[in-house]
Image (cartoon, rainbow, N blue to C red):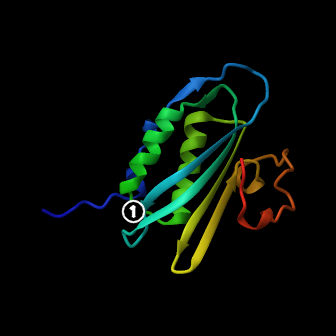
């Protein structure tokens, strides 16, 4: 029996659940996922730290469901670039935040490290560029802190 290879099309956004935002006031939620694993395009394990900065509207992230979603990615074969885009799209679709910023810092592979970022505030992502914290910032040489 041949093994079915799971791809980005098999990533299930329905695993992500939300909770009502307990307040209508503005605030920022920062989430770190330090054990983010998946299968790279050569079906070899890849590892990353994911940093999620979230400005909620009506819904917030239920962390248990985020853990289940992340755990399900361990068997998905996907490129870095596709993965960050699918992850971002699912967060936007499920939670409809005021703003979300996703940063993925991938462990070195073959002597090369990668860091990918998407911010919903960017005009190219449909944002209004009303937050200016990312403008002109050549982020501090890979260090990302919470």
* Number of residues whose C-alpha sits closer than 10 Å to that of mark 1, classed few (under 14), some (14–19) or many (20 or more): many
Counting from the top left corner in percent of width and height, residue 4 is at 25, 60
User: What residue appears at the point 64 percent right and 63 percent down from the top-left corner?
Assistant: 116
For this view, does 127 lie left or right of residue 8? Answer: right
Q: Could you say where residue 80 lies in the image, as x and y percent from the top left?
A: 53, 64
Percent position of residue 93, x then y = 57, 39
Seen as rendered, the residue at the extreme left is 1
Quarter holding residue 5? bottom left
Residue 104 is situated, as x and y percent measured from the top left of the image, at 61, 58
Residue drawn at the location 37% of the way across and 51% of the way down? 10
Q: Residue at x 69, y 32 (%)?
A: 56
Total numbered labels placed on residues in the image? 1
At 56% from the left edge and 80% from the top edge, which residue is drawn? Answer: 111
- Residue 63, above or below 34: above
Q: Secondary structure at mark 1?
A: loop
In this view, 58 is above or below 136? above
Q: Is residue 4 left or right of residue 100?
A: left
Front residue (pair 3, 35): 35
Report the front residue among 127 and 57.
57
> Pointer 1: what residue?
77
Quadrant where the N terminus sits is bottom left
């Amino acid at each position: 029996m041949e093994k079915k290879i799971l791809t980005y099309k098999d990533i299930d956004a329905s695993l992500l659940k939300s909770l009502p935002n307990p307040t209508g006031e503005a605030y920022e939620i920062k989430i770190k996922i330090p054990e983010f694993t998946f299968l790279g395009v050569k079906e070899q394990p890849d590892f990353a730290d994911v940093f999620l900065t979230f400005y909620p509207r009506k819904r917030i992230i239920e962390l248990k469901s985020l853990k289940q979603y992340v755990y399900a990615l361990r068997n998905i074969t996907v490129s870095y670039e596709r993965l960050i885009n699918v992850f971002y799209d699912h967060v936007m679709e499920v939670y409809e935040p005021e703003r979300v910023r996703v940063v993925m810092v991938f462990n070195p592979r073959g002597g090369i490290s990668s860091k990918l970022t998407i911010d919903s505030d960017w005009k190219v992502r449909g944002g209004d560029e009303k937050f200016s914290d990312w403008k002109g910032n050549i982020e501090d040489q890979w260090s990302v802190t919470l």
